[in-house]
Structures are given as C-alpha cells and as structure tokens.
Image (spheres, rainbow, N blue to C red):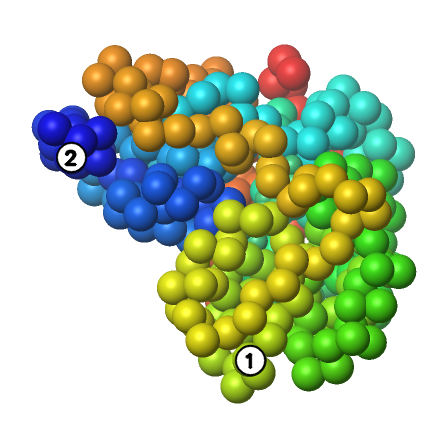
Amino acid sequence: MEIQERILKLKKERGALLLSHFYEPAEIQDIADEVGDSLYLAQKGQSANHPVVLLAGVVFMAESVKILSPNKTVLVPDLNAGCSLVDSSPADQYRQWRMKHPEGICISYINCSAEVKAISDVICTSSNAEKIVNAIPKHRPILFGPDKNLGRYLSKKLNREMILWPGSCEVHVLFSSRKLFELKTNHPEALVLAHPECDETVLDYADVVGSTSLLLKTVEERPEKTFVVATETGIFHQMKKLRPDAELIQAPFQSSCACNDCPYMKLNSLEKIESALQTLTPEVQLPTQLMEKAKVSLDRMMALTQGQSVQWPESFSAPTVSI
Ligand code: 13P
Ligand code: SF4
C-alpha cells in the first residue's frame, strides 16, 4: 500500500481530521481534508466533530485548535515546527511590555505562544486583522505584536497609532525591495502580491497585500496572466492548480539563496503524519489554566470575525498563570 493510502486508512480508523496550511509540502496538502490559512484552520479545527485533529502546519496553529477545543486530541507531525515570531516574543518580556501600557488593548498576531495569548486581549490573523483593529474603541491605545511588519502595515492603512513589538518572520523579511522594483519594471504587466509579514519597503511595491487565502483568491479571480508572489513557496502549489495558465514568479531575495521555504513548515512529512496517526503522538498538551486564559483572547477574535461585539477590560492586570 502507498503511504497516502495508509494515511487515509489510519485517518478513518482514528476518526481524525487532517488539516494543512498552504505552506506545507504539496504531497501533504493533497491528502489533507482541508487546506487553508491560519484563521480557516483554527475555525475548522474548532468546529470539527472529529475526536482527533492532526494539524500539518506549525505548532502555534495546533495550539490554537487545542485551546479552542480542549477536549480534542490535537496532534502535530513534528513538535519542533516552531515559528520565528513565537521565538521573538518570549512571554516574560512580552508581559513587561504589556504592563507598561495597562490602559492599552493588546492585539497579538496568532503567530505567538499560548502564554502570549494568555496575556493578550485579542488575537488576529492576517485575514481578519483589519476587522479586529477597527473593533478597538478609538480612545484606547493599541499594542500590537509580535509582528512589527503586519502592525506597521495595519497602522498605516487604518490610520491608527500602535505601539509595536519588534518581532518579524525570518522568511518574509528576506525579500528584496530593490530587486522587486527591478522585476516590476521588467514585468509592468504583472500583479505583485505580498503577505503583510514582508518588510514595509516590499509592501510599498505590492499591488495586493493580504493573507495566504487572499493572495490565492486574487490569483484565481484577477484577469492578469503574470503574478509576482512575495510569500512562502508552498502557496505556489494551490496557485498553479487554480491558474495553470498564469505565470507565477517568486519575488526575489536579498541574497541568491532560495530562502522562501519556511524551515518549520517544511519539517513535516507524510512519514511523520503516518507515525502521528499510528501512535497518537506528538500530542499538543498545555496546562488547563493557561488554556483557559489564552482562550479569552482567541474567543474574542472568533466573535469579532463573525461580526459579534465583545467587552474589553478597562485595564490590564497580569494573570496569575505561571508562564
Ligand atoms: P496566513 O494566516 O496568511 O496563512 O499566514 C500564516 C503565516 O504563518 C504566514 O507566514
Ligand atoms: Fe512563522 Fe514565518 Fe514560518 Fe509563517 S513563514 S510560520 S511567520 S517563520
């Protein structure tokens, strides 16, 4: 039996839902029940009736599903699949920063640890970030972390001042705005697409800035035949499927490396997925009290995403969760 067939069989036996992010290797995307951006995966993981969710992505994505659905068994192919944004926002330092502005509302990008979620007022992803920022009362200062590039982009676009945490994505900051300008000059017919984790100088040259799902939708719907894409390489798999007629050009890097692979997303493999379904490990496990605290900010995100209103705390008081 081929590994794909074995995985499908195991998935059935375990009652497991297999979710994949767009940055995963193509063969993983192809056997997943759902492929999507981080918001979509969190929503699908939460609403699933399956007792087991296997999230092929990075660990913070699986943690979000676990926090939203603590009774499910949430598996990841590799617990080392981290994220540079998580690494650049240690919870103790984030808490100190948060405590300097107790009257502010802290929006944290979903690319952060459960501990950071527990000391945030609300979470956002790149697909709902504008909605979340617009929901913050105008008189309240906004703290935004850990991605300074997404924060700066939102601040400029929505004309809201923000106190930014200085984190960034190690993959998206490597695109070169100078080379992108040259490429754009040589391909005036091309539409430039960029993920908001890119540096501001790259975003300035982009025609469309948005989440992985928005970039895909743009490729699907726009009439242009050439697209320059400034995001992680995994997304090309779905883009090619949607627009086999289009020329898809990877945005250039500062060096000559092919560094558009997220090293964490690419830790996952079919072999690790098969093993996770066989052994029900590695499993995402978090302390109950921490999950309860972190769920507050994730629940607010889900409510605002659905157009519901939420209550904001008057000021920040550090939770007693040990982090
Ligand atoms: P999306 O939510 O747009 O899929 O982004 C997730 C991510 O990690 C981008 O680097
Ligand atoms: Fe994190 Fe960047 Fe990888 Fe996305 S691409 S998971 S932000 S390191």
Image quarter where ligand 2 lies = top right
Marks 2 and 1, how far apart in space? 36 Å
Q: Earlier in the sequence, mark 2 or mark 1?
A: 2
Position of 136 with respect to 297 (left or right) is: right
Residue under the image location 45 percent in, 75 percent down: 245
Q: Position of residue 92 (x, y in %)?
A: 76, 20
Q: Residues within 10 Å of mark 1 (few under 14, many from 20)?
A: some
Residue at x 65% of width, y 16% of height: 323
Q: Residue 312 location, x and y as percent?
A: 65, 50
**What residue is shown with label 2?**
5
Q: Is residue 231 left or right of residue 149?
A: left
Q: Is mark 2 within 8 Å of ligand 1?
A: no
Q: Picture quarter containing residue 11?
A: top left
| Residue type, mark 2 in image | Glu
Q: How many marks?
A: 2
Using the image, tell me which numbered label, if any, was put on residue 237: none
Task: Give the amino acid at mark 1.
Answer: Lys
Callout 2: SS: helix
Q: Which mark is residue 225?
A: 1
